[in-house]
Amino acid sequence: MGSGDTVPELQVPHRKWRLLPIFLAAALMLASAWFGAALQADYAHMQQALSPLVAKSSRMVPWIGVGLFLLPGLLLSCHAWRARADLPADCAFGIRLAWQMLLLAGGSFALQGILPFETGKLPDADENRLHVVAGMLCWLCVWLSSLCVALTHGIRPVLRLLAITIALLLPFLLLLAPPLVGGGLAQRLAIAVWLGWCMQLDTIR
């Protein structure tokens, strides 16, 4: 991003505790998805996305959306906010911007837990429009974070290659893979890529 910027990479003490919000978010999503699917006999994890689990017409208890979207998104946003705040003053602008994008991604993901969604309706229907837009904004921000890192000057070649790989992999998983492997599996793989990207980016200090 800037030819004069540098990207220090330091050993961060107790890094496993720094990653705790990511693991908590993953655990909440897994538990909520499992519990929600258990209440829907016709729900297929590999074929269906997460949003139908919080549909108004489903037999879900109200806190499924909280555990599936709201709390995990807030945890990921808090992790991104803390990671950005801990960056050294001379850290490259591209890395700061990447964390800003991940902060927004977590916030957008969290919004899906409180915005209504109704199965059987088109994505642009009044009942679903804001929920779908929040999901699209989430993935756009995750993708932009990888692009910011890929364009940053002074990072390790391995990290640049990883950022480029993620920038190519996310559109494939979200746009091309659903007809091939099922929308549910594609979305879950994209979420795994997102969480793994957060953990890898956290190594840069």
Image (cartoon, helix red, strand yellow):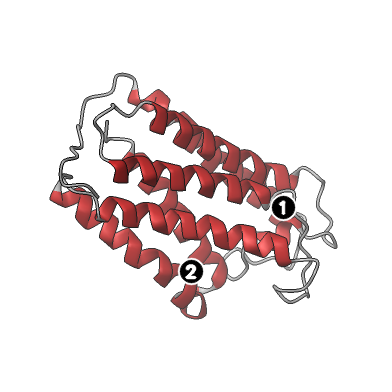
What's the residue at 33%, 59% (across, down)? 166
The 10 Å Cα crowd at callout 2, few under 14, some 14 to 19, many 20 or more, is some
Q: Alpha carbon of mark 2 to alpha carbon of mark 1: how far?
A: 22 Å
Q: Nearer the viewer, residue 186 or 9?
A: 9
Disc 2 designates what residue? Answer: 174
Q: Earlier in the sequence, mark 2 or mark 1?
A: 1
**Looking at the rendered structure, which numbered label has been put on residue 172?**
none
Q: Secondary structure at mark 2?
A: helix
- Please, is residue 173 above or below residue 114 in the view? below
Q: Report the amino acid beneath label 1.
A: Gly
Q: State which quarter of the image contains the C terminus.
A: top left
Residue 53 lies, in percent from the top left, at: 72, 58
**What residue is shown at x 46% (from left), y 59% (from top)?**
190
Secondary structure beneath dot 1 equals helix
Q: Looking at this rendering, what residue extends furthest in the bottom direction?
A: 179
Image position of 28 (left or right of 205): right
Q: Residues within 10 Å of mark 1 (few under 14, many from 20)?
A: many
Q: In the rendering, at what x and y percent does residue 50 appear?
A: 64, 59
Give the farthest residue toward the top.
Answer: 13
Q: Which residue is drawn at the image coordinates 70% and 57% (left, top)?
A: 37
87 to 190, vertically: above or below: above
Q: Nearer the viewer, residue 58 or 97?
A: 97
> How many numbered circles does the render carry?
2
Residue 44 percent coordinates (x, y): 64, 67
91 versus 174 height, above or below: above
User: Which residue is labeled 1 in the image?
Assistant: 36
In this view of the protein, which residue sits in the foreground, 90 or 46? 90
Which amino acid type is marked by label 2?
A: Leu
The residue under the point 78% across, 60% down is: 55
Coordinates of residue 189 in the picture (x, y in percent): 45, 60
